[in-house]
Image (cartoon, grey):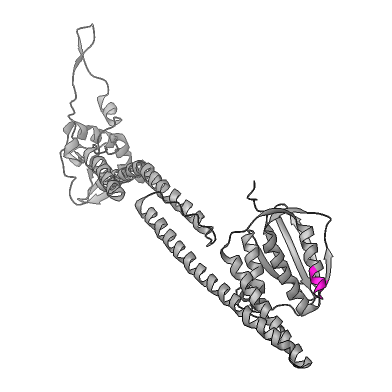
Amino acid sequence: MLALASQLLATLVSVAVVGWLPRPAAPQMRIDQAAQVLRGEIAAAPAGLRLQEQSVPPAGNGNHWLSLVAAQQLGLPISRVRLVWSSSAQVPDVHIVANYVLPGAGKVGKPPVVEDQLAALHLPPFELGVHRGDSRWQVVGIDHSDLAIWRRQALLAFLAGTMLLAPLAAWAAYRLGRPLRRLADASAEFDLRSMKPLPIDGPREVRMLAEAINTSRARLREQAEDLTRLLAAAAHDLRTPLTGLRIRAVLAPPEPAKRMVADIERMNAMIQQVLDYSRGQLDPPSIQHLDIVSLVDDCAHAAGLRGVKVQANLPDSLPWEADTLLLRRALDNLIDNAGRYAGSVELRIHRLDDVLLLEVADRGPGIPAEDRVRLLQPFQRGEESRSCTTGGAGLGLAIVANAARRHGGELLLLDREGGGLVARMVLRRMQCRDR
């Protein structure tokens, strides 16, 4: 409907401007100026005139008096001069009064120099021809065409239509663009953990799009919940036979029992990673006030009890808002991962306004640049130095990356100067629920 109305309005404007408005008048001419062109005193183009030669005199409605004036200006007999109007539709009625009565005198006298006055008079377009001795006619006329007039009319119609349609187009763009921008902003914050639907407003097509996205989003969440429940159930059920295997391992000879217990512990760690990952996928973060320094110090102390050498360069205190469980789980994974490959770990904290940087640095073999994006995905394991012999389900870095995203940030894997790896968690300040 909007497109149809715009087309109809543009057509009506064009018809009104081109068809109903009066035709623009052509530029006017002067006899003395045309005579100057014929005498070669001035050029034709700068005066808006054209000069041409032809074998026949100019055709059209002429005027005897004006021809006489032109002959006088040219100093030629009337038989060699012809003045005609360029368009019969604009032929003026010219009369020269030969005698006049002086006001209050009652006497008849001779008029002033009427020819000079007529020569300087602005007249409608005409053609003035002079017959040369070689049977050729030199004709001067206006350098103007009807095509140029219609072009101006068409340009005027276009400009008028544009000025009338511009407010309508701006209104339509605003009405369509505003809900689309809101829809784009809401879609950019797409998160399966959030059940907030996208806004449904604006034109019918935008509403249909928002409804389709909401439906797809709900379906994706259901599928993700089903998959997460499946992972959690499988991981939980695996713990029962592992407990039985641990009991039987006690009855085995010491050396085989030691290897069996190590395998069982590694399987338990893998199951715990799957459970941690599944729990963190859909549940919204629980943001609380905390002292981030105290949390990092607790993680460092717990890692030391597990045999990891940790060096922490921390400030005295740093209040922050975050999900304690998510951050503790992420730091434990980073510290254990660095300790497994490097033996010792260095912890650092930096704050930049509303951004917190938690860094876990080591002097291990590092991670190749081409593998860093891949290893942030779930169930992705490194090769070579980070081989399968070290254990793990390929979820450690995925759990950390997920925790960083849920705090509005990201996990960066960077080369450490002098060798090693720096795992940097970029966290943004979150708003507590109790506010």
Magenta segment: does it hold 304?
yes
Magenta segment: does it hold 107?
no
Q: Is residue 174 above or below residue 359?
A: above
The answer to whether residue 56 is left or right of residue 236 is left
Say which quarter of the image contains residue 253. bottom right
The answer to whether residue 40 is left or right of residue 399 is left
| Residue placed most toward the observer, 61 or 379 | 379
**Residue 404: percent from left, percent from top:** 65, 63
Q: Is residue 366 visible?
A: yes
Q: How many marks?
A: 0
Say which quarter of the image contains residue 63. top left
| Residue placed most toward the observer, 418 or 316 | 316
**Residue 62: percent from left, percent from top:** 16, 37
Q: Is residue 43 visible?
A: no
**Residue 328: percent from left, percent from top:** 72, 64
Q: Residue at x 48, y 69 (%)?
A: 223
Q: Residue at x 45, y 51 (%)?
A: 199
| Residue placed most toward the observer, 334 or 243 | 243
Magenta stretch bounds: 302-309
Q: Is residue 129 above or below residue 314?
A: above
Q: Is residue 248 above or below residue 74?
A: below
Q: Residue at x 79, y 78 (%)?
A: 342
Say which quarter of the image contains residue 209. bottom left
**Residue 378: percent from left, percent from top:** 60, 74
The answer to whether residue 264 is left or right of residue 208 is right
| Residue placed most toward the observer, 291 or 92 | 291
